[in-house]
Image (tube, helix red, strand yellow):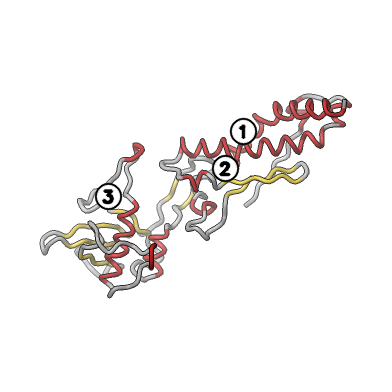
Amino acid sequence: MAKYVEFDVEKLMGPLDILQKANFNYAAKQTLKIVGFQIAKKYLPDQMSKRFDSAVPYTKRSISYGVQSQTLTLSVNPDESKGNAPAKYLFGVMSETGGPAYPTRFARWLWDKGFAPRSKFPVPAFGSPAVPISNKGGTSKVPAWFYSQTQVALARSAGNMVVGKGRKSLPIKGRVAGSRVFNIRGDENRNLSPGIYRVKSREKINQLFRYLDTFPMVPPKLPFHSTSLEKARELIPTVLSLQIQKSIAKTR
């Protein structure tokens, strides 16, 4: 949902004289362009790098801004043509209160292919010897290849189901892709919980992913509205004052 904020310039800067008011409209528009650029292209990407576990360049470029008259609009990219839309996967961490985790492409693939019910959320089986952990950037996480190779292994177990094509096709060999795996969709197996398993031998079965009954919640890490508002309040007085001075200088 969009949120709108109006600034009382004279409360931020103090009373304007006649000359300042005469040059205000042009200066205000230039100010909003500068402030929009600073927030969308400098400040928020920098905060993403500091507050998110691993902000990739695509995520840091996801904030855009536009200026119409004396209105600045900041928005998060809703485009899904290149994969997950930043507006969707950032919703929880950039909301004011947090929210449910956004389903990844891997989760949606499992649901679409019928491996997991849509009421269950797949997460790596942390603690299992079959799950690789990367500590890149000081944060423990599962590498991206683990998801893609699990897809391939599951597809093969289902009868050579096609996963990708051409240059973008998923690998058919690898630590997980070449393994024998099986899937437990619900509660049909009393000995094993729902999820994806890899078979090393008759005596050695390790879980790769668990199917949770509820979507995990993510805490707010960078509230979009309040963070942007606070930065705008900080920038506007100085930038606007300078732009008014520049506008006055041009008229002399």
Give the residue drawn at x 83%, y 27%: 248
Packing grade of label 1 (10 A; few <14, some 14-19, many >=20) is some
| Quarter of the figure that contains the C terminus | top right
Left or right: residue 119 compared with residue 135: right
Q: Quadrant of residue 180?
A: bottom left
Which residue sits furthest left? 203
Residue underneath mark 3: 126
Q: Nearer the viewer, residue 170 or 218?
A: 170
How far separated are the C-alphas under marks 1 and 3? 38 Å
The correct choice, above or below, for 148 with respect to 165 in the image is: above
Q: Which of the two marks, 1 or 3, is nearer to us in this view?
A: 1
Which residue sits furthest bottom? 159
The correct choice, above or below, for 68 with respect to 231 in the image is: below
Which disc is residue 231 wearing?
A: 1
Give the residue drawn at x 17%, y 62%: 199
Which disc is residue 224 wearing?
A: 2
Kind of element beneath mark 3: loop
Q: Amino acid at mark 1?
A: Lys
